Image: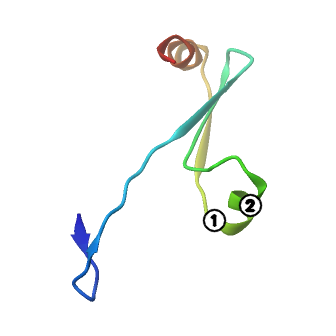
Amino acid sequence: MRRSQRSAVVRSSLHAKCVVLDTVHVFVSSANFTEARQQQNIEVGLHINSEWLAERLVNHF
């Protein structure tokens, strides 16, 4: 937890979403995959071409 400028407790968390395509392409992002969230939020994502990582994510989930 951290405190804002007004000394109120601010709770936050971070979690990622993962998409695996074609057993090679991996997309890891903070984005919620809805149109409303894409238009209202600033999100960041990473596209990775890695068969090794894609296989491990598929096996994990």
Which residue is under mark 1? Answer: 41
Compared with residue 47, is residue 10 higher up or lower down, i.e. above or below?
A: below
Residue occupying image coordinates x 63% and y 65%: 41
Tell which of 28 and 39 is nearer to you: 39
Q: Residue 30's x, y, as percent?
A: 55, 49
Which residue is under mark 2? Answer: 36
Q: Residue 26's x, y, as percent?
A: 63, 28
In the rendered image, the quadrant that contains the N terminus is bottom left
Compared with residue 45, is residue 25 higher up or lower down, i.e. above or below?
A: above
Q: Residue 4's x, y, as percent?
A: 28, 80
- Which residue is the extreme one toward the right? 35
Residue occupying image coordinates x 50% and y 42%: 16
Element marked by disc 1 = loop
Q: Residue 13's x, y, as percent?
A: 37, 54
Identify the colour scheme used. Answer: rainbow
- Which residue is the extreme one toward the bottom? 6
Q: Which of label 1 and label 2 is nearer to you?
A: 2
Task: Name the image quarter holding residue 36.
Answer: bottom right
Residue 9 left/right relative to 50: left
* Mark 1: amino acid: Asn
Compared with residue 35, is residue 22 higher up or lower down, i.e. above or below?
A: above
Question: Label 1 crowding class (10 Å Cα cut-off): few <14, some 14-19, many 20+?
Answer: few
Kindly check if marks 1 and 2 are in contact, taking CB atoms under 8 A apart as contact.
Answer: no
Q: CA distance from mark 1 to mark 2?
A: 8 Å
Residue 55 left/right relative to 20: left
* Mark 2: amino acid: Ala
